[in-house]
Image (tube, grey):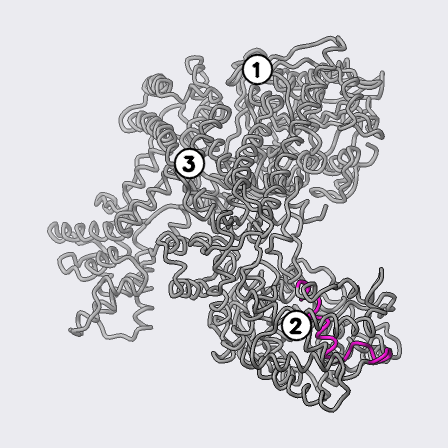
Amino acid sequence: MTANTQFRNAMRPSRRTVLRGAGVAMALPWLDSLPVWGLEPLVMKPANPFPKRLAVLFMACGVHPKHWWAKGAGADMELSECLQPLEPLKHKLNVIHGLFNKNSTGVGIHPGQTGNILSGASLQKGAELRGGISFDQLLANHLGQDTAQPSMVLGCEQPITGYHETNFSMAYSSHISWQNATSPVPMEVYPALAFDSLFDNRGSRRNQSVLDRVKEHAESLSRQASAGDRAKLDEYLTSVREVEKRIERMRDVQSNAAERASAKGKSLIMMPRPDNGLPEDIREHMRLMCDIVALAFQTDKTRFATLLLCRDISGLFYPFLDVRNAHHSASHNEMSDDWQRVTTYYCSQLAYLASRLDAMPEGDGTVLDNSCLVFVNNMWSGSKHDSSKVPLLTAGGLGDTLQTGRTLDYSADGDENRKLCSFYISLMDRMGLEVDQFGDADTQLARL
Amino acid sequence: MALFISTYRIFRTLAAVLCGLMLVTNFDVYAQQSDGNRSTSKITAAELENAFNNVVRPYLASYCLDCHASEEPEAMLDLSGYQSANDVGQAHQTWAIVLERIEAGEMPPADATQPRDEEQAAVIDWIRDTREFEALRNAGDPGTVLVRRLSNAETNYTIRDLTGVDIRPTDSFPVDAANEAGFDNTGESLTMSPALLNKYLAGARQVVEHLMLLPEGFVFAPHPVVTDTDRDKYCVKRIVDFYQRQPVNLTDYFFAAWQYECQVRSADAAQDSLDEVARGHQISPKYLRSVWELLTDDENAFGPVAKLQAMWPARVDMQTDAARAQCATMHDYVMSVRPQLSPPIDKSGIKEIHTGSQTLVLWRNRQRAANRRAFDPSILEETAKVGDESIPMDPQQRAAYMAAVARFCDVIPDEFFVSERGRDYVDEDNKQQGEKGRLLSAGFHSMMGYFRDDGPLYDLVLDAKQQHEIDTLWQQLDFVTSAPMRQYEGFLWFERTDSGYMRDAIFDFARPEDQQAQSAAMIEKLAEVYVQKARENGGEGAAVEAVEQYFRDINTQIRWVEKARHDAQRSHLQAAIDFAERAYRRPLTALERADIEEFYQALRKIVSHEEAIQDVIVSVLMSPHFCYRVDMAPASEPLRPLTDFELASRLSYFLWSSMPDAELLAVARAGTLHQPDVLVAQTRRMLQDNRVRGLATEFGGNWLDFRRFDEHNSVDRERFPEFDDELRQAMFEEPIRFLMDLVRRDQSVLSLLEAKHTFVNAPLAKHYSLLELEFDNHDWLRVDDARDVGRGGLLPMSVFMTKNAPGLRTSPVKRGYWVVRRLLGERIPPPPPNVPELPSDESKLGELTLRETLARHREHASCAGCHERIDSIGLVFESYGPVGEVRQFDLGGRPVDATALLPDGRQAVGLDDLRKYLSDERGDEFVENLIRKLLSYALGRGLILSDELLVRDIHSKLTSEGNRFSVIVECIVTSPQFLNKKIAMNGQPK
C-alpha cells in the first residue's frame, strides 16, 4: 500500500463497509467463539488464531483524585475506592498513572482537552475543525478490513456543536474518534441501530440491490450487442456476478458459524434487539452499549470500538446515585462524595464489559485475554480542568502481548517519556500495525 | 495524396529505367508490370499475390529469415509465417517497419549478404503497393471500436462535470493499460475485473458522500458531508462567501456617486445612467442611488449629512486620485461617528435565566438587527454632540438636525450584515481577543445556533435575484444541517446543566435525548412551564415576551424543516432521474424513468429516503450506461452513422475527455449535430472551452509521455533540493498550458517545435532563472522570449529533460529517443539484451565524459544502427541537467558540450541547431506523426491501413492551411471513420 492510498483510506469514513459483512437473525446467541473460529480458515491465521481487539471507554471531566489509585501488583494489588468494581478482575487490569497529551494542555479547557484525546493532535479554534485521525481509526483503516465493520463508534450521549468560551468548537467535546483531521466519525447513540449495523448487513444489502440493478442494465445491453461488444459487456457482467457471489459467500460463512455454535449446544445467552429510541435510563443505555461491544467482539463483527460513555461538558444525570447535579456541574466538586459515586459508577461500566468478555471462552483463555479495553478520562481534576496527567486503565492481555495486574507510574519520567501517544503506538504495534510516529510521539511507551 | 503519387511515380520510372540495363529477373518483371499497370488501372489482388510468390518470398528466404524466424527471432520480428499477400495486408503495421528498415538501408545489416539494388527496389515497391491496395480498398472504414468503459481519467472528468465538484474517485484505482498507440482510451486495453468493480462501487459510494439534499433537488459538496460538522461547514461557508462578495465599501459608493455627479454637472449629452456607473464600479445600482441621493439631499443638509456633503469632492474640482482619497476620508468619518448613533437595546434579564441562554441572546440579537438603520434622538441628549459637532439648541434647528441624523442612519447602517459573532454578554476586549471565526454563530453559551442579521444588506444593496439567493442559502442551512433541531436540543441540555434554570423536577419531562421533546405539543408544554417560572421569578414585559417568542420561533423553524424535508422528497427523486439522464449522456426512455422510480420505492422498504436517493445515484454511477461508452450498432445495420447523441459523446470524449455539456446535448436533441456545419461549429466552440485541458492532458500527456509525471519519483532530492513537489507539479503543468494555448489560439502545430514562448508559474520561473517576473499567487504567465533563458516550445521543457534523465546524470539516449520516437514517430527496435549499463551518476563516469562513453558504444556495429539516429539528437540537450536546469558543467565538474553530428551529416551546436534541423528535414515526419496520434486517439483504436488516405488528406490540407491545429481536428470529426459505427464482423445477432 502506498503512502498515497494510505492517506486516501484514512480520508474515507470507516462506515463505508463495501461488500463486507454478512448476517444472522436479529436475536443472536452469545457464541462460544473458539469452535466457530476453529472451523473458519477464511478469517483465521495460524500464527495468531484469535483476533486482537481494542475498545476505548471514555469518561469526561475528571475522576475523584483522592480515591483513584492502586498499589502493588498481581494478587497483592490494592485498589482505591473508586476502582473497587474492578477488584474481581484486578489480575487482568493495569492502572497507569501520569500519561498526558501535550497538545491538550495550556490551550484552554474542555473541548481543547477532549477532541484530541485519541489523536494527540493540536486542535484548531474557530469555525473550521482541524485535529488529527484517532488511533482507533488508524487501526480500523489498516486492520479492519477482515470484519463486517472496520470499527464501531458508539456514544451514550448525543454529540453537540456550538462554541465553547475557549473558542474551540464543542464538536471536540463530543467526538473522540476522528476519521481524518477535519471530520469526526459519525457516532451511533441508538443501541437499536448499533445492533442493526452489526447484524442486518444493511450495507451489503444495499450494495446487493445496486448490483442487481446494474446487472439488469448490462444484460439488456448485452442482448442487443454484437459478439465483440458482448465480450466486453460479459467482462462487466462476470465481475458483477463475482462480487455478488463474494457477498453471498461471506453471508454463508457467518450463518454457518452461527449454526455450528448453536448445534454444539453451548450455553446460549440471547441478546434481543434493543428497542428503538434512546433508553430512558442511562444505566440501561450504557449496559446495552457495552453488550453490543461484547457481542461484536465475540462474533468478530468488528475489532475496534470506542464508546463515549458521556461527552465532555456532559449533561447526564445520576438520580440513581442520589446526585442531583448534572455530570459537568458535579465534576466541579471533585472531592465530593457525589463525585466519588459517579467515578465509581463509571469504573463499574469497565468492569461490566470486562467481565462480559471474560465470560466468553476463546482458546485457553477468554475474549478479554485477546482484547485490550482502555478506560481514559480527559482530565485528572474537574474543578481545576487539569489535564497534565489523565486517569488511565487497561483491562485484558491483548493476546499475551500486554502483561497485566500492574500499577505503572510515569509521573516522574519527564514529559518526553509519558506521552499518551507513545502508549497508543505501543498498542498499535502489539495489534500488528507498526507506526513510526503518531500524534506527538515517535517512540513506544517504556515498561508497558 | 498528390505528393505521394508523384514521388512514387518518379521512383517507379527510375526503377523501370534501371530494368532495361539489367538482367531480366522476376524482380524486373514485377517492377515493369506494376509500373505499366499503374498508368492505366489500379493494382489488382492477383498481381500482388503473384509478386508475393515470385519476388517477395525468395527475397525473405535469402536475406531475412536467417535471423527473423525461429523461436527467438531478432528484434522479436518473425517474418516466416506469411503465406500470401493478404497475410501481409493484415499485418500492415509490422510491414511498415520492415519497409522502413529496408528503405533506410539498415536491413539486411551490413555484415550480412546484401541483395542487389533492384531486388531491394522491387521488394520496396511491392510492400508499398500492397499497402496502397489495402488502404484504398477500404478507405474510410470506421474500423472496429468496441464497447468500452470510461478510462480512469475520463471517469474523473465526467464525475467532475456531472456533479460540479472534483471528487476524483478513480485516483486510487489501478492505472489503466494503454493500447499500442500509447493511449488508454480503447476497448482492447480497458478491461473490467471483480476487484476493479469493487473499486467502482467504493468510488460511487465516495461520490455520494458529497451528496447533499436541498429543499429543491440536490447538489454535491466539494468535501464529504456525512457529519453534522461537515454540513455546517458547507452551508455556512456558502452564506459567508455570499456576504463577502457583496460590495459594501462606502468609499466605492461615494466615489461612484462623485463620478456620476460630475457627469450630471458637466451636462454632457452622452452621459452614463446611474445604473451604468454602478455596473462600471461593480457596485449595487440600488444603493448607489440611495447614497447619491443622500449626498445631493439639500433638505437634510445638517449634521453628519452636511459633513459628508461638504467633504464630497463633487462640490469642488478635483483629480480622480484626489477624489478617491477624499472619499476614503468620508468613509473614515462615517466609521468615527456611526457607532455612537446606534440605539441602545434592552438587556434586562430574568432571575435564574442564564444571560447566555438562547432565549435572551436571541432577544438581544433581534433588537440589534432591528436597530441597524434606526435612530433614537434621546441617546444624544447626554453628549449633545455628533462626533465633535455640537447639536443646535434652537428647537427648530434641532428638529431639522435630528431628522438629518435619522436620514444619515437610515442610508448608512451601523452594519450591513454580521457574519461572525462571539458572545455578547462577555466584555468586548475578551471577545475580540478570543472569539474570532464563529461564523454566523448566534452567540449562545456553548450551544450551537445561527442567527441571521443582514437586513441592511438585503434591503439596501441586493436586487431581487440576490435576495432570493441569500434567502435560499439560509433555508438550505436549516434544511441541510437540522440547525433548529440541534439548537433546541442544545437548549434543553444547557438549561438543565450549565444553566440551572430547568433543574426543577417540573422540567424533567423535557430531555434533550428524547426525540419527542421536539414535537409541537412538547415545545408548547415546556414554553408554558418555562414562562410560568419566569413570571414567578419576577420576569415581566419585553423580557418575558422574548422568552415566549423564542418557543414560538423555534417551533416554527423545526416544523418548517420537517415539512420542507417531506415536501422535497419528490424533487429529490426527480433530480435523481435528471442526474441519470445526464450521466447516461442521452434521453432516458420512459421505461428507464419508471425503472429508477421503482428502484427507489423498493429501496425505501429497507432504507431511509436519503439513503434511497444515495443508492439510486450509486446505481447510476455503477451502470454500464454511465461507465461504458456504448455506441452499439443493431445487427440489422452492420455499418451505420452514429446517432447525434452518440456523436456528441464521441466528440466530447475526444476534445474534453469528459461528457457532453448542456449545449452539445441540446444540439444533439435538435438532431442537427451530424450536419457538417453544425458539427464544425460545435467543435470550434469546444476547442475554446477550458475543458480542452482534458485533451491537452490525456492526449498530450500520453503522446509526449509525461502523463504520470506528477507522480515522478526518480529525482534524487538531496542532490536536487530545488526539485520539490511544487516544481514537479509546475513542470507537469507547463506542456499542458502550452498545448491548451496552442489549441485555443489555433496556432500552427509546428510551433510545438519552433515556438519562442512558453508558460511559467513562480516555481518554474525560478527554475528557469526568470527572476524579474512577478506573480500573484498561483498565476501562470506567458514568457514571449523564452529563448533568452534556453526555453521555448516543447523541446527544452524541464518535464521532458527530467523524465528522460535517470536521476543523477542526463541521458542523451533517452532524450534523443524521446525526440525521434515521440515527436517524429520513428520506430526504434528494443536494444539487444546484455548491453552493459552506464553508471547511474555522471560524476562517477571516470575519465570519459558521457559523450565519449556513448561514442565508444556507437563503435559497435550492432549498436550503431539505432544509436546514430538518437544519440546525436540527445547530445544536443547536454546543456540541460538531470532536472532540466540550464548548466555549464556536468555533475562531474566537466564543461558540458552540446555539439553533435546530426543524422543528415550537419554539425549542430545546441538546441537552436536541432530546431533548425527538425524544421528543415523532419517537419513532415513530425506533422504526420501528430496526425496519426491524434486520429488514433480520436477514434479510440489503433490505425488501420484504410486510414492512410485520410492521414494523407489531412496532411495536405494542413499544409495548405498554415498547419493550424483545428484543421486536423475538423478533418477528423468530419471523417467517415469518426461519424460511423461498424458492427464487429464476427457479430452474430440474436
Q: Which residue is mark 3?
A: B591
Question: Of residues B415 and B976, which is closer to you in this image?
Answer: B976
Mark 1 falls on what kind of element? loop
Crowding around mark 3 (Cα neighbors within 10 Å: few <14, some 14 to 19, many 20+) is few
Q: Chain of mark 3?
A: B
As for residue B91 lying within the magenta part, the answer is: yes
Quadrant in which residue B671 is drawn: bottom left
Q: In the picture shown, does residue B197 fall above or below B132? A: above
Q: Is residue B489 left or right of residue B711?
A: left
Residue type pointed to by label 3? Leu
Mark 3 to mark 1 CA distance (whole Å): 42 Å
Mark 3 to mark 2 CA distance (whole Å): 57 Å
Q: In the picture shown, does residue B323 fall above or below B26? A: above
As for residue A422 lying within the magenta part, the answer is: no
Crowding around mark 2 (Cα neighbors within 10 Å: few <14, some 14 to 19, many 20+) is some
Q: Which span of residues is magenta-colored?
A: B90-114
Q: Which residue is mark 1?
A: A274
Question: Of residues B320 and B576, which is closer to you in this image?
Answer: B576
The answer to whether one can see residue A90 in this image is no
Same chain under badges 3 and 2? The reply is: yes
Q: Which residue is mark 2?
A: B47
Quadrant in which residue A427 is drawn: top right
Question: Of residues A344 and B63, which is closer to you in this image?
Answer: B63
Question: Of residues A308 and B129, which is closer to you in this image?
Answer: B129
